[in-house]
Amino acid sequence: MNIRDIASTTEGKLPWFLKHLEQLVRVESPSEDPAAVNAAQELTSGWAAALGGKIKRYPQKKFGDVYELRFGHTRRQKPVLILGHLDTVWPHGTLKSMPWLNKDGRLSGPGVLDMKAGVVMALTAISVLNELGLLRPVTLLLVSEEEIGSPISRPITERLAKESSAVFVLEPAQGLAYKTARKGVGHYDLHVTGVGAHSGVDFESGHSAVLELARQIDRIAGFTDLSRGLTVNPGVISGGTRSNVIAAEAHAEIDVRIARAADEKRVDRLFRTLKPFDKACRLTLTGGINRPPMERKAGTIALYKQAKKLAADLGFALDEAATGGGSDGNFTAALGVPTLDGMGAIGAGAHAAHEHILLEHIVSRTALLAAMLATTE
């Protein structure tokens, strides 16, 4: 493998990258609209087919379809699995207030960073290797509901990961770095049922669900243990109907992040020990950890060291980082499959109105991805 050939060929494909990324960003694909996500999937799978990819579609009902795109598959070598998603957090009509722009070295638009650029980077890297005769078996999995927890695609992701030698996740970079660790993610819902009453006429007969929830939130916040990387955030609360009514119902949505797999059972036990302060109130708890942590383990470290050396050959330094956010790479890392994350575009503003990627890094990052695909056993 000649790293200079990969770099120069990738440079020549920058116009292709820009053209296709613009087309993809202009197809709005909110997670909640299966038809919209499928339109983005069909567009992308068409490009994959033109590159010689074999398409397998997993039809869904509640969410968009999942697409498995295979390139260069043989029985002699395990594939590398590339993970991507085409759903975004942005509702229809966002392009009006947040249009596609290629200006001053920034490419902007809904979903451009998270993570449509990563998907187009993957196809560009595959095209580079195809042209140079270096294409090894690659599976590109494009899911439709990553932004809402991957409830239907997780089994597909895990099955394909077990068949692969490594997993590359094309989520955005952490600054300039690849991600070698991610926290696990959990979500709990706590519903409190109290006893409603008139707050002026019959105050003593009431048992406030709002007051009970407030006490529970204070207790729950105490589950946080920063020394272990465990955080608990009651982020959404609701309850009551009027100020002169003692609340009969209240509800909280709680985000949990864990850095260690061993803490999954620990934090769940803490939640399951919750008891009412007011015995007249009733607690109903649902939820749990839905993404295990991606811990920094030997297989991932080896991939990072490989990437760091290749980056140096390409003329730039590559750092590693950990993040509190989750991705589908959490699933594959928890299976023991070497997983490297944050291999997508460099930019800022994921899930925010200033979402953008930086054009200056596209060629080098895509060339590094191509080199990683060519050299991973």
Image (cartoon, rainbow, N blue to C red):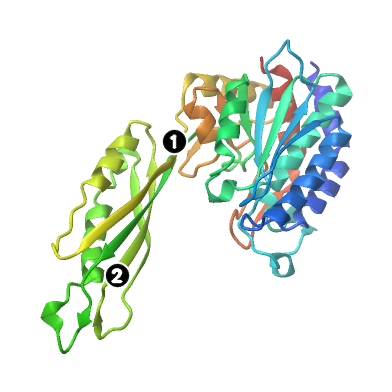
- Counting the numbered discs, the total is 2
276 with respect to 54 (left or right) = left
Q: Count residues near mark 1 (Cα–Cα under 10 Å), then give few for <14, some for 14-19, many for 20+.
A: many
Circles 2 and 1, Cβ within 8 Å, touching? The answer is no
Q: Which residue is mark 2?
A: 249
Q: Can you see residue 176? A: yes
Q: Can you see residue 312? A: no
Rendered view: 76 above or below 328 = above
Q: Say which quarter of the image contains residue 243.
A: bottom left
Residue at (86, 29) in percent of width and height: 52
Residue at (85, 25) in percent of width and height: 130
Label 2: which secondary element: strand
Q: Count residues near mark 2 (Cα–Cα under 10 Å), then give few for <14, some for 14-19, many for 20+.
A: many
Q: Which residue is mark 1?
A: 292
Give how far apart the Cα atoms at labels 2 and 1 are. Answer: 32 Å
Residue at (67, 31) in percent of width and height: 82
Residue type of the residue flagged with mark 1: Pro
In the rendered image, the residue lying farthest to the top is: 76
Label 1: which secondary element: loop
Residue 41 spot, x, y in % from top left: 75, 46
Residue 102 spot, x, y in % from top left: 79, 56
Disc number lying in front (2 or 1): 2
**Quadrant holding the C terminus:** top right
Rendered view: 31 above or below 368 = below
In the rendered image, the residue lying farthest to the left is: 204
Tag shown at residue 196? none
Residue 314 spot, x, y in % from top left: 73, 27
Residue type of the residue flagged with mark 2: Glu
**Quadrant holding the N terminus:** top right
Front residue (pair 371, 144)? 144
Q: Mark 2 or 1 closer to N-term?
A: 2
Rendered view: 318 above or below 89 = above
